Each structure stands twice: as structure tokens, then as C-alpha cells.
Image (cartoon, grey):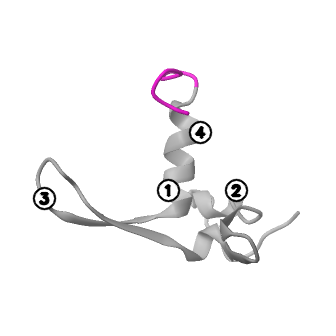
Amino acid sequence: MAISGYSSHDWRKHTDNAVVGTGSQLLPANDCKVYFTDPKDLKDYEVDVSRLIRVFVNNISSHRRSVK
């Protein structure tokens, strides 16, 4: 599938078919963000879901026990 509008370094081009949600409410992962407070430093963070997918894919082989 040829995707236009993404740079060569943009991970979102690899997550076009990824979805987030439950049941009938599915949203494209590229349009979703996760908002959370880090329990260690109590700072609020905003992370793109596509970035979380990238981290998961990059770490799955080196951290098999921590990635489930």
C-alpha cells in the first residue's frame, strides 16, 4: 500500500492499519494519544499510540520477559 504524506522517518506510515478501541468503537492508532502520569516523577505525559507501537516492536526481541 503506497502512503503519501509521510516522511521517510515517520513511523506512522507503518501503523496505518492499527486500530485502538473496544467492540464497535475502533479508532485509527495514528489519531490516538495516551495521557498518563508517571508514578515515579508525577509528571503528566502525552504519547502517540504509533510511538508506543514503535517502542514495542523495537524492544520485543531484546526484552522478551517485559513485553507481553
- Name which residue type carries label 3: Leu
- Separation (CA) of disc 4 from disc 2: 11 Å
- The residue wearing badge 1 is 51
- Separation (CA) of disc 1 from disc 4: 10 Å
Relative side of 67 to 5, left or right? left
**Sequence-earlier tag: 3 or 1:** 3
Magenta residues (range): 61-68
Residue 8 on the magenta segment: no
Residue 63 on the magenta segment: yes
- The residue wearing badge 2 is 14
Pointer 4 with pointer 2, Cβ within 8 A: no
Q: Quadrant of residue 1?
A: bottom right
- Name which residue type carries label 2: His
- The residue wearing badge 3 is 42
In the depicted structure, whether residue 34 falls above or below residue 42:
below
Helix or strand or loop: what does disc 2 sit on? helix
Determine crowd level at label 4: few under 14, some 14-19, many 20+ residues with C-alpha closer than 10 A: few
- Separation (CA) of disc 3 from disc 4: 27 Å
Q: Quadrant of residue 66?
A: top left
**Sequence-earlier tag: 2 or 1:** 2
Task: Name which residue lies at 62% across and 67% down.
Answer: 29
- Separation (CA) of disc 3 from disc 1: 21 Å
- Label 4 vs label 2, nearer the camera: 4
- Name which residue type carries label 1: Arg
